[in-house]
Amino acid sequence: MIGMEPSSSSAEWKPTASQEEQWALERHVFHIYQLFCNIPPKSQAVMLELQRDNHIEYLMKGLRHLGPSFSVLDANRPWICYWILHSIALLGESVDDALESNTIDFISRCQDQHGGYGGGPGQMPHLATTYAAVNSLITLGGHRSLSSINRGKIYSFLQRMKHPSGGFSMHDGGEVDVRACYTAISVASALCILDKELTQGVGDYILSCQTYEGGIAGEPGSEAHGGYTFCGLATMILINEANRLDLPSLTDWLVFRQGVEGGFQGRTNKLVDGCYSFWQGGAAVLLQRLHEAGDLFQSHALQQYILLCSQVEGGFRDKPGKSRDHYHTCYCLSGLAAAQFRWSKDADREPLPGLVLGPYSNLLEPIDPLHNIVFEQFDEAREFFTESQHCDDA
Amino acid sequence: MDSDEDERIPLRQRPEWSDITPVPQDDGPNPVVPIAYSEEFAETMDYFRAVYLADERSLRALQLTTEAIHFNAGNYTVWQFRRVILEALNADLHDELEFVEHLASKNAKNYQLWHHRRWVAEKLGSEAAGRELEFTKNIFLNDAKNYHAWSHRQWVLQNLGGWENELSYCDKLLEDDIFNNSAWNQRYFVITRHPGIGGIEGIRDSEVNYTIKAIMTKPENESPWRYLRGLYKNNIKAFITDPKVSTVCLKVLTSKVNSVFALSLLLDLLVHGFEPTQELKTALESLIPESNNSDSDIAARVCSILEVMDPMRVNYWRWRKKSLFSC
């Protein structure tokens, strides 16, 4: 809420860096909204339409080819798979058999012989890329994909990453933070290998990261942050310890992260960014379920920001003026899905369509918000992994 | 190498690498998300794989990790192997600080870089404190809210020391930009963890005064409002009985400025058992006199006012109102 450009001008009054940035963005966004308000309803409907075909084209292209500039993401290839495959699944589409088979084959090449997945073939296993690889394979679904995951070895990898603080290290010799906790616990939960040994101390670690503001930080003492707040809250729910958090202050901090633009910011007094549509919007959905409450944020305003400010012709971006990328495409679409549904307090039940901004054809596939996997595929995987014959090897 | 990149001699033409057979990436016959690597990138990684698989902890391997990191600072495997080599060679870690500082100018938001820096600083011990604080300070000149840099700074303070001037550093940053929430967070970190301060209770009074001053300058700034609540964390009794808290609410409510944060703080006070003065009640009534006389409960009335004044959070305020009567 750095909103409100001052109407009175006082001589000694000089805007700070935070204010300058905020006002510049507001001008940009409100210009778009004003344009939108002044066009006929028919054109408005077009502007609000989710450009499904363009998005699919952009996503499919990335799966098949990435230019040299992607070399900086060479240690994140399972992430690129997940961002793309999850986006495609949210749009209700799937890849053809050949592409599916190639994806399973490629991700298997990232699997370490001692368990877990690395950022590319031959790289060390890493918790975040393990999360991305497992989520990708669950999103593809089917026997071949799901059985390509070596759950027993992933379990030993997770055990090995366990840190004395109660948290997890990202990789051998890697950093310990809330992200590591989430990716480890989410993977274990999705694969039905979550046990006491893995959850031991995790709750204490996450609790130590909840700040005086109410949100959750990456490490004890750091600043409350949207990404870590989603990770921390989802982890606490997955290990059944959410009630140990200060939920009223968490909720209060979170709803205040929705800016006048309709999108979410990651931290107090920072700019809104399309990716927080999921990190904050998804966390809001989790809180709604915990509180058994209806909407706690403005779903309509969020959808408006995503569709009018983040959407470009094929893909999504952080904010007007920035370029699209697969990461923002994935998390803008995930946020859109979080905003479109009515969430049942029963986590096992599929959420029902709620308020959809724009044409009804904008409706995406519902997700399981804890793991951010399309509900149907998540359900299939859970069934697959809980069937006793697949569980025994864990 | 980055000073003159087009003069880079391919590894296969360098005599010191002639004994090494490069190991290509095992991408399979039909990889997805294939990256069209430049020739230099692919070659560097092929040689890196060779020394990594051979576990060759040598000077040339160290230099190779430098090249690989310049191509992609996000490759955590390369960074991890670099640490293994540094340890094996018992290398001078001061050079390593320079390497990281040079990289940070382009990759200030890279996880691996900061993790590596922490590892180096830990090895060097308390002698490194000053340089680390200076290093993060320089990062903040360009990006005062850099998340990794703040985490690093906090780690340095807690593990290597250097607390002496930290509170005045926070003062300075807040003077530059009172909306800088990272600086407010750092302030909270200092007052709760500085070994010489001895906890929040002793410093609360002066901090409350500082915060209220900040609120009165810019009541629309959320940061000090959250900080103020934080000062009373774990002491609800002091929160609702300290007249300074309700007074700042009253001041803002009667000054015709954005009062969402004042109302929201007042609501928290009321929920915790605060008894409002007549003056506060009058101030509330004058905000939206015509509406909501139906709310006999004063906290409910605050919620109703917030529903109107803060439409982005209308659902939240409704829910807060409903929650007033359910527990």
Image: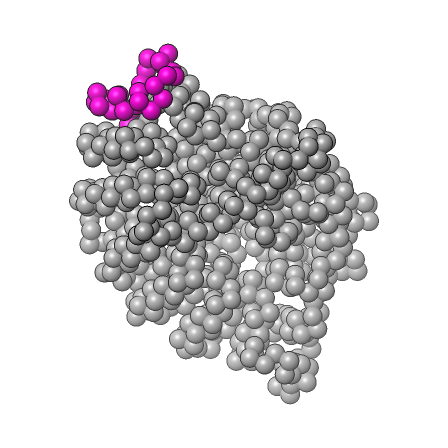
Residue placed most toward the observer, A385 or B40: B40
Spot occupied by residue A81 in the image (x, y as percentages of width and height): 68, 50
Q: Which residues are magenta?
A: B269-298
Residue B95 occupies which quadrant of the picture?
A: bottom left
Spot occupied by residue B309 in the image (x, y as percentages of width and height): 41, 28
Q: Is residue B218 above or below residue A362?
A: below
Q: Is residue B11 above or below residue B294?
A: below
Tell me the quarter of the image containing the N terminus of chain A: top left
**Position of residue B268 in the picture relative to residue A310 (left or right):** left
In the image, what residue occupies the spot 38% across and 52% down? A16
Residue placed most toward the observer, A4 or A250: A4
Residue B230 seen in render:
no
Tell me the quarter of the image containing the C terminus of chain A: top right
Spot occupied by residue A148 in the image (x, y as percentages of width and height): 71, 47
Residue placed most toward the observer, B134 or B254: B254
Spot occupied by residue A273 in the image (x, y as percentages of width and height): 53, 46
In the image, what residue occupies the spot 76% across and 48% down? A57
Q: Residue furthest bottom?
A: B15
Residue B117 occupies which quadrant of the picture?
A: bottom left
Q: Is residue B204 above or below residue B238?
A: below
| Residue A96 lies in the magenta stretch | no
Total numbered labels placed on residues in the image: 0
Residue B269 seen in render:
yes
In the image, what residue occupies the spot 82% across and 45% down? A97
In the image, what residue occupies the spot 41% across and 51% down? A18
Query: Which colour style is shown?
Result: one colour
